[in-house]
Amino acid sequence: MRLAACTAPKRHELTSALLAQGRTGTISWGEHVGNELYRTGEQLFDFFTPPPIGSHRPYFIPTLTAVLVLLFFFMAGQYGQYQALVNPSATICLAAMQGNGTAPGWGPRGMVTWIAPQQHQWCFGGKGAGKFDTQFLIGWGARWAPAMRHSPERWLTPALLHNSFSHLLGNALLLLAIGLLMEVKHGTWRIAAIAVLSAVAANLLSAVTEAPCTAVVGASGVVFGMAGLMIADMILNFETLMRPLLRSLAMMALLVYFAATVGTTATGTSHMSHVGGFLGGLLPGLVLLPNLHRGRGEAAVTVVAALGCVAIFVTLPLIFYLRQLPGICCGC
């Protein structure tokens, strides 16, 4: 019998039959060993065989979203201590508010201060009510050019940080809307890889093309990376999508609104982070995603995408570290 030709149900039936045969005690020791090896091989094969496309369980995107939310509120809880050290007037302001009964308090009431900030209850200065200041974000791992000399992890850590609750909420909702769809279709490992690559690409392009002394934070690069991945999926597997044109128009309208309204820096919006994140999802997606119906010319698309990945992940770091970083001096 050619076992490789058996379908999955037949292989499972054969495995059950071999197990029942072994329990009867009517087979030789050698046959018993052979049956055990076959059953073990089948179990390993089933374990390492990925689910069919479109039936993966999403683990990465929900976990990442939970991490973003928990980290933001942990930072919010630490911000008062930070302000007490660097801005003593904040402590005086809070004491005065406590005395007249208008202080925001702590616990759930303190969380509301960040979710729906009121300027008259804000004692921490900075860029406005409910926002972290630049130095606090830099201390937490924002991408800031002078710190890149000795902190290469900052190419990735800004994607975990947000400067306000509205910033976090916009990113989290879009990440769930697009990322869950892609993870269910293509699986956790591909989506995790694309998320990391798009976060790095967003910071690389922004660092090379925008003001070096601006602190950049936010998961918008990852959000645009998921959008780029969706476009890559459409290019490779257009015929497998349901209502692809309507889906594309809705997604692009949402992204345009997002790009125009949600900031990624402590002072505004890093549009090149959006572009870099989109390319960091599109180009690796064209290389990593399965092509269910390869057509004429699609091999060339993969080659071009691979060259684009080299340009982003090799050329841009060389430009930044060899040409730009040596001459950067913030505050000079």
Image (cartoon, rainbow, N blue to C red):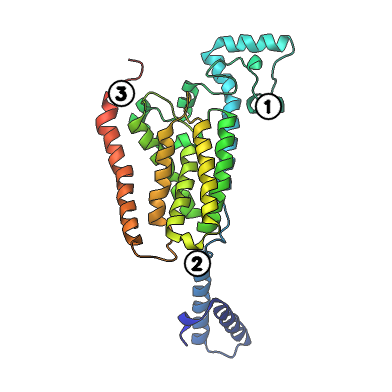
Which numbered disc, 1 or 2, marks the residue that appears first in the sequence? 2
Residue that numbered label 2 is attached to = 49
Q: Is residue 158 left or right of residue 16?
A: left
Amino acid type at mark 3: Ile
- The image position of residue 265, as x and y in percent, is 47, 28
Question: Mark 2 and mark 3: span between their CA atoms?
Answer: 50 Å
Observer-nearest residue: 332 or 236?
236
Residue 112's tag is 1
Question: Mark 3 and mark 1: span between their CA atoms?
Answer: 39 Å
Which numbered disc, 2 or 3, marks the residue that appears first in the sequence? 2
Q: Secondary structure at mark 1?
A: helix
Q: Secondary structure at mark 2?
A: loop
Amino acid type at mark 2: Thr
Point out the residue furthest to the right here.
Answer: 101
Q: Is residue 58 above or below residue 16?
A: above
Residue that numbered label 3 is attached to = 328
- The image position of residue 33, as x and y in percent, is 50, 81
Amino acid type at mark 1: Val
Label 3 crowd bin: few (<14), some (14–19), many (20+), radius 10 Å: few
Q: Secondary structure at mark 3?
A: loop
Question: Mark 1 and mark 2: span between their CA atoms?
Answer: 46 Å
Label 2 crowd bin: few (<14), some (14–19), many (20+), radius 10 Å: few
Q: Is residue 262 above or below residue 303?
A: above
- The image position of residue 273, as x and y in percent, is 42, 35
Which numbered disc, 3 or 1, marks the residue that appears first in the sequence? 1
Judge whether residue 150 can be spotted in this image. Answer: no
Q: Is residue 306 left or right of residue 15?
A: left
